[in-house]
Image (tube, grey):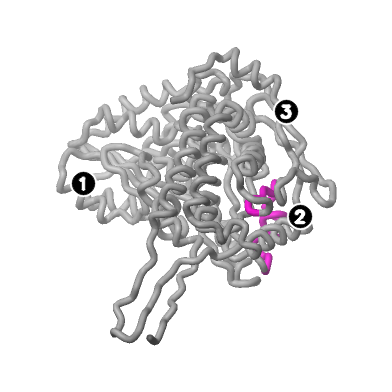
Amino acid sequence: MAQQHTFEHWQSLAASLKPEGRAYINGRYVDAVGGDTFDTVSPIDNRVLARVASCQEADVNVAVDAARDSFNRGVWSELPPAKRKAVLLKWAELIEANADELALLETLDMGKPIGDSRSVDVNATVRALSWTAEAVDKLYDEIAPTPHDQLGMITREPVGVVAAIVPWNFPMIMAAWKFAPALAMGNSFILKPSEKSPLTALRLAQLATEAGIPDGVFNVLPGFGHTAGKALALHMDVDTLAFTGSTAIAKQLMIYAGESNMKRVWTEAGGKSANIVFADADLDAAAAGAAAGICFNAGEVCTAGSRLLVEDSVADEFMEKVRALVAKWRPGHPLDPNTNVGAIVDNAQMERVLDFIQIGQKEGANMTVGGQQVMPVEGGLFVEPTVFENVNNDMTIAREEIFGPVLSVIRFSDEDDALKIANDSIYGLAAGLWTNNLSRAHRVARKLRAGSVWVNEYDLGDMTAPFGGYKQSGNGRDKSLHAFDKYSEIKATWFKL
């Protein structure tokens, strides 16, 4: 349970914080080989938080060599699963013990409300690590059904060196979904955090060493996608690359894999998720879910319910409720525990959101809530949650992932119409539906082309369920026991007795 601190407490803690900006390679902090750095700037008030190592190809080579050496020496890969579990559980304990610092780094670096960083991001990171650690010594290999004079064994082995490129919207959680199963399987790991939010990853690395992760097994390379990210994707000695981010970058990484060593590439890419409200739903609950589905984390969520599909017969009544609820999600100072909408991560992303708001107006959608840049903190990057009504599914704001608090409301006539609209997207990451008809709930959930479907709720789940998408939302799955498949080789060994 996260301790509730005051606004003044968080401000005081922020004033004394001195973030680490160097890369973490082979168990220690190091400057980039070429000495290059970049500033990480807080979107809250435009303050420079740290000068961060800008890793290039030379740094990638050093980190991959360290990871390969640690893997080949077996200092982690050959440990009994129960011993790896103990170290990972210790790491989870250390993350919990340093929860306030990590939450503050997350909020200062990318702008989310401190209440969310502390109660959602830190807790979910701890859960991902501890749940996965507990699972690793409970995964059994298989014996094939063979004749009496033969023995066929099917075993999982670690793939070797795993690299992960993760986004800025949930920096710790997205990283943990990848490093937890990769490390639990015995791989060595290189994390490339977003240049927009590198600070928590660098602190997690130090805690990993304190927990007992051997040198070279967990490395962090801050830097840009076109330098460090590209070098990892093209490296001939990286065995697996895991990625969360845009569909365009996911496609490019798959090309790089083909141009190099055919490394496995697992991608969780974009989304334009449909949140469907039928006339027989609990409209109050659905309205609350619709508002939270686009306003939480300032809409910077890959599964955001950015397309709200509402049945014609209740649309007027329902949208009155939605407008009133969205208006209660107000940008405020992210260090204030009462704030529910924080800053947009950087100026480029804020301009992207504002551009889409202009496009929606030009295309004829009716903007009924928000739509303005606001400044609850001087120098900060904040946009009001925005609602567009009278949207059709061919409009730009209904087709493209905005990654901001912008809701497109589309009316439908019946169940078939709702499914046609919902599935008419290049994406298939998630969807929601609201109905009190049990048969309809099962029927529609089956027909939605999405990796996650929520019924009478939106964007819930835990580590026990897999997460990933259909279509151009990516491949593979994070979370659950299915995540181990991404970081394993399956070997068949046959004996003649």
- Which numbered disc covers residue 59? 2
Residue range corresponding to the magenta coloring: 217-236
Q: Nearer the viewer, mark 1 or mark 2?
A: 2
Q: Quadrant of the C terminus?
A: bottom left
Q: 27 or 162: which is nearer to us?
A: 27
Please tell me which residue is depicted at 45% across the width and 31% down the height of the picture: 295
Q: Earlier in the sequence, mark 3 or mark 1?
A: 3
Please tell me which residue is depicted at 43% across the width and 50% down the height of the picture: 479
Left or right of residue 374, residue 483 in this image: left
Left or right of residue 157, residue 275 in this image: left
Identity of the amino acid at label 3? Lys
| Residue closest to the far front | 497
Identity of the amino acid at label 1? Ala
Q: Which residue is mark 3?
A: 18
Q: Earlier in the sequence, mark 2 or mark 3?
A: 3
Left or right of residue 496, residue 110 in this image: right
- Which numbered disc covers residue 450? none
Query: Residue 131 sits in which quadrant?
Result: top left
Between the C-alphas of marks 3 and 1, the distance is 50 Å
Q: Nearer the viewer, mark 3 or mark 1?
A: 3
The crowding category of the residue bearing disc 3, from other C-alpha atoms within 10 Å (few below 14, some 14 to 19, many at least 20), is few
Identity of the amino acid at label 2? Asp
In the depicted structure, whether residue 220 falls above or below residue 121: below
- Which numbered disc covers residue 441? 1
Q: Position of residue 165 (x, y in %)?
A: 60, 52
The crowding category of the residue bearing disc 1, from other C-alpha atoms within 10 Å (few below 14, some 14 to 19, many at least 20), is some
